[in-house]
Amino acid sequence: MKPLAGLFLALFGVAVLLVAAGFGLDAFARSRPQDLSALRMRTAHVRGATLTLAVADQPDSVGRGLSGQGSLGSLDGLLLVSPDSDNTRVTMLGMNFPLDLLWVSADGEILHVEENARAGLWPLWHSSPEPAAQVVELSAGSVKAHKLAAGDRITFV
């Protein structure tokens, strides 16, 4: 019985350390928001709606995303362009508000939609069941407001 108790305590200790590290990373991400106005802008058209998106297409800007931002301000969202279409996972670590997420193919088809992804540590990653070239992060409620769904086409100008 004692070896099991020791194993349990060790696993519990590791779990506590991982949670503490997660909170530390979350606080760090919130402390370093990127300047969205320094990113280039693109207009997107989908289902009759016109969206103004900041474009994150460099590793640092993609990695930082909207973490630490208080809001989107006058923007409708952020377009994350991944050089690796097999790796379009999104984390809500360091986020201060929920998002609607759209995974989009290279030809503009919305492949997967996730509504109201909450800020925080869990789940750590949000992803599409199929590879996507880009992800659009919008304010929570945008998918419902514009009646967006997988299969819709989005064009970027």
Image (cartoon, grey):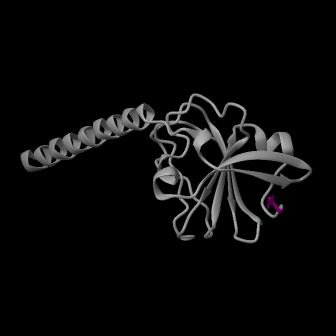
Q: Residue 66 placed where, x, y %? A: 56, 41
Quarter occupied by residue 115: top right
- Farthest residue, direction left: 2
Q: Is residue 56 above or below residue 146?
A: below
Numbered-mark total = 0
* Residue depicted at 47% across the width and 42% down the height: 122
Q: Is residue 59 left or right of residue 46?
A: left
The quarter holding residue 157 reads bottom right
Percent x, y of residue 141: 75, 37
Asked if residue 111 lies left or right of residue 86, the reply is right
Task: Give whichever of 106, 42 is nearer the camera.
Answer: 42
Reply yes or no: does residue 80 show up in magenta.
no
Main SS, magenta residues: loop
Nearest to the observer: residue 101 or residue 134: 134
Most foreground residue, 53 or 37: 37
Above or below, comparing residue 114 to residue 35 in the picture: below
Q: Residue at x 46, y 41 (%)?
A: 93
Q: Residue at x 51, y 58 (%)?
A: 58
**For the view shown, which residue lies furthest in the right direction?**
48
How far across and how far down the image is residue 3, in percent? 8, 50
Q: Nearer the viewer, residue 139 or 37?
A: 37
Q: Which residues are magenta?
A: 153-157
Specify whether 41 is left or right of 11.
right
Relative to 105, is 31 above or below?
Answer: above
Which residue occupies the extreme top position in the image?
70
